[in-house]
Amino acid sequence: MKQPDLMDHPAAELSAPGRRWDTGALWTVAVLAAWAGVFWFLWASGSWALHVSSRIFWVVPFGAIVLTAGAIGRLVGARRPHASRFTTRQAAALALLAVPVATILAMPSTALGTYAAARRGAYTGGISVTDISAANDSQLQIAVSAALYEPDVLTALARRAGDEVTFTGFVTHQPGTLSDEFQLNRFVVTCCIADALNAEVRVVDVTGGPYASGQWVTVTGALYPLQDEILLDAEKIASIPRPKHPYLNG
Amino acid sequence: MKAAVELPVVESPPAQLPGLNRVIAGGLVLVVAAVGASLRMLHADHVAWLSTLLLLFSSLLIQAIPFVLVGAVVSAAIEVFVPGSVFTRFAAVPRRLQLPIAGVSGLAFPVCECGSVPVARRLASKGVTSGAAVAFMLAAPIVNPIVILSTAVAYRGRPTAQAMVLGRVGLGLLAAVCVGWAVSGRSPRQLLKRLVVDAPEAGHHGDRFGAFFGHFASDAVSMSTYLVLGAAVAAVLQTFVPSSAMNSVSGATGLNVVVMMGLAGLLSLCSQSDAFVAASFVQFGPGPQLAFLVFGPLLNLKLASMYVGTFRRGFVTVVLIVAATVTFAGAMWIGALVR
């Protein structure tokens, strides 16, 4: 089954007598190294925050270190007395694994936005009613969205009526809404953005603008309970660039 | 050093391309360059659906591949450092006890489903019965402490919280044992496929370092290849199918359970985060939500792709039939109890 493989790799000519570089192993090393490069890039550039929650940030350095160690370890063992065959199946598998590397490195720096907001569900879980009295603005933003579906959360939030808060998110406009209103959206991510759910807050008394769909803003205003929902009565709105961490943690 | 996965290979040996290594290398580089160039030319950030699709695809992989690496490290360590006598002793345990023991042992392996596949493959190849290896693989992503905790957090404050946590663990364990029982008559040779990228044969005696990294690379690359395919399909569905598409059947008893099982299969979420998504389907009752939580980690697009690359023909069908039946019956029953 095993046959000596005439190598295309020039290093083979330099190898010790009886030992030669294994082509398949070298390509495996190349793909592992490329994936290691992806994780190092995500880590160094901070663009991991566009893909995963900070709760599981550890996967990024873990991936970078383990893949680097794996590539080095495999390279050390890639010179063998009898090189194995490099088959079409192996080549296809390695090529397939290389495609996402190009995708991740070439794609523009972008985050989930208005397109996803129109298609993904609302965040409703993980809200502790007893914590709402001491919740910070990010937690309140999630809770306000969940209040549409959780009566207990709505009741707890109503006790904070009039409290001044500052919420951050991107703007969307629902058909039929008044000109002085928009929806403020921010995705809540637990692991990766595949589980992203939208925390959506209705902002009223909007002045200035107009604010285009997708524009990131911070809105400072007061919580305003209205029957079965909580509104944000805007006092000050500022356009901002997309935050470095565009998602909230679930 | 003992050789890698010592599975008799029934299928014909893969085709070789003598002298074509340069062509393969060139083709690989061209494919990668073409993908990168296309993305730049398309201005993906100006095409919302494409931008969302690529983000979802890459995020699914960035999150899942480290868990595959955990599984590959554990799998290689089992192969190289754990003596075969350990597995021989486990194989001596009565078969009717092996399945539940294997299922419960998932408590000690806190990774999501992508990491448990290479470990189960290694266990089966080392002498653990096929049923026990499969029961471990299916139960580990559901019964491990991190998943239990995340489910409890997602449902905290809700009257159904306890039922969802206990129901998920109990029903997931039951489904895993049932699938394990269904495949327990198969030998490793009948169960497992050859990996896409073979581990190297034994090097010079005592080269544990080389053997470990050889097995690690083989498992990591082989599993990730199928993960890429599954993630691509899952990303397409997540991009184009709105979550509201299922709302019309939320009140149809029975059908709503089936729909939520199907949704879990299509979304391919990590078992550590899927409870938050399940909890967001407030229009569905606890039964359909429980079905989502149990069925997703047993069989989804990502997993199905990995199963196809790991197990022989028919395995996905067995998982689908047995897991779907147990999940459906259990979710209907528990849903009726906690309504």
Image (cartoon, rainbow, N blue to C red):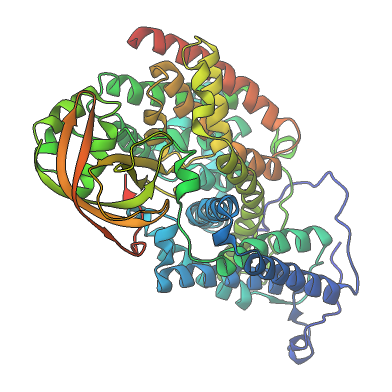
B317 left or right of B290 in image? right
**Where does residue B252 sit, x and y in percent of width and height?**
51, 10
**Where does residue A64 sit, x and y in percent of width and height?**
47, 68
B21 w.r.t. B334: above or below:
below
**Where does residue A44 sit, x and y in percent of width and height?**
41, 74
Q: Give the image quarter of residue B88.
A: top right
Res A81 visible: yes
What residue do we see at 42% from left, 44% from top? Answer: A196
B296 w.r.t. A38: above or below:
above
Q: Give the image quarter of residue B26.
A: bottom right
Res B126 visible: no
State the quadrant of the C terminus of chain A: top left
Question: Which residue is situated farthest in the right direction here?
Answer: B18
B81 w.r.t. B260: above or below:
below
- Which sits in the foreground, A211 or A216? A211
**Where does residue A61 sit, x and y in percent of width and height?**
41, 66
A54 w.r.t. B268: above or below:
below
- Which sits in the foreground, A23 or B61? B61
A24 left or right of A127 in image? right
Question: Which residue is situated farthest in the bottom direction here?
Answer: A14
- Which sits in the foreground, B211 or A178? A178
Q: Give the image quarter of residue B338.
A: top left
Q: How many marks?
A: 0
State the quadrant of the N terminus of chain A: bottom right
